[in-house]
Image (cartoon, grey):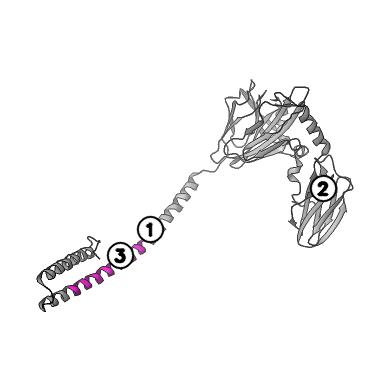
Amino acid sequence: MKRLILTVLGVVCGWSLAAAQMDFRQASGIPRPVDDLPAGTISIRVIRGDLSHPVVNHPVELRVGDDLRTVNTDAEGRAEFVVATTGTVRASTTVDGQRLESQPFPAPGAGAVRMLLVATDKETAARAAEEAKNAVTGPVVLGRESEIVVQPGDESVTVYYLLEIVNAAPTAVNPPQPFTFDVPLGAQGAAIIEAPEGRATVKGRTVLVKGPFPPGKMTVQVAYGLRATTGEIEIEQRLPADLEHLAVIVRKFGDAKLTSPNISRQQEMPADGQVYIAAAGDSSIPAGQAITLNVSGLPHHSVVPRYLALSLAGLIVLIGIFALRRPMEADAQGSERKRLVARREKLLQDLVKLEQDQRRGRLDAARYAERRQALMEALEHVYGALDGGDSGVAA
């Protein structure tokens, strides 16, 4: 259990160990603002594959607007520039025929910038190609050093998978099925924290570790976040290889409690001023079988005020819509009444004219009777509508 605590401290409290083995190509050419360099400094470090292979005494170009500057790297592979002007900056170099360029970025001004330019390590690539050529189909397992680490925060939880992939064969192997798995639904920001160069990738929720796997052990670390707004999270994870031993570490945050059908024993252990729940299972877990972890008792803010605020906001919107409709309906009713009054006056004028034409002998009796009946029916509809009855008035 002590080993578990030391591991979790190395992961959640300091990332330098992971950085020493991560795929640096993902960070190549991306400027990173820092505050440990003099103002206006741009420090560019050129490496092959990882930090243990700096490219020494090698020219690096920095273009600031139309100004092109060149500085050679030092013993650690760093070339430093001081830029006192404003404008867009781009760094570049060529290593072993590979053209490496940074993203364009603004001059740091009163700040400073560090950056990596990462070339492919051809020796590593050649070894990988040779391994792939000689690889056979064979199984890998997740060794006893594999762990799941849960780091609660404020209404969120960060989950780390420390996967020790073991190939017990004397030669490189490719598993019968690709080594790939999905992190749980709801996971956010899944990322590879540590892996051999170019061997592990994340796309959305899907993690893929590429073969072939060399003899011995390979370490891959994956991290993702989960929302914990209710004070409880559930992790259900299926892994693509047999897990020899389930070990789980949860930082004791608030009144956090761990329950799992896969856990047979657990205990709380202090370390570095923190308290951790260290838990383990008694048996191995076959590939594809669900590992279910429930962490409850996490601090969270009550959702009642949030729902009340949303309900109040919704009520205000409804009142606003209702209040807006009232004047509109009143305006519409006023316009309709004016139209009915005008229609009534027109019908009355037509009735008077009809009576005058009848007295003057301009209409025969049948035409007079038909026209008068139509006018009287139309007037009845108008008067009914004005009194609040039928509003369907004949045109």
- Name the residue beneath numbered marker 2: 45
Tell how many labels. Answer: 3
- Name the residue beneath numbered marker 3: 333
Q: Amino acid at mark 3?
A: Gln
Tell me what residue is drawn at x 28 percent, y 69 percent.
339
Magenta-span inclusion, residue 341: yes
- What's the magenta region? 325-350
Q: Report which quarter residue 148 is drawn in.
A: top right
- Name the residue beneath numbered marker 1: 322
Task: Assign a secondary structure to mark 3.
Answer: helix
Between circles 1 and 2, the one closer to the viewer is 2
Q: Position of residue 308 (x, y in %)?
A: 46, 48
Between circles 3 and 1, the one closer to the viewer is 3
Q: Amino acid at mark 2?
A: Arg
Left or right side of 249 for 374: left
**Looking at the image, which is closer to me, 269 or 379?**
379
Magenta-span inclusion, residue 44: no
Q: Is residue 151 visible?
A: no
Quarter of the figure with the N terminus: top right
Q: Which mark is residue 151?
A: none
Q: Amino acid at mark 1?
A: Phe
Task: Assign a secondary structure to mark 2.
Answer: strand
Quarter of the figure with the C terminus: bottom left
Q: Is the residue marked by circle 1 packed among few (<14), some (14-19), or many (20+) residues within 10 Å?
A: few
Q: Report which quarter residue 184 is drawn in.
A: top right
Task: Assign a secondary structure to mark 1.
Answer: helix
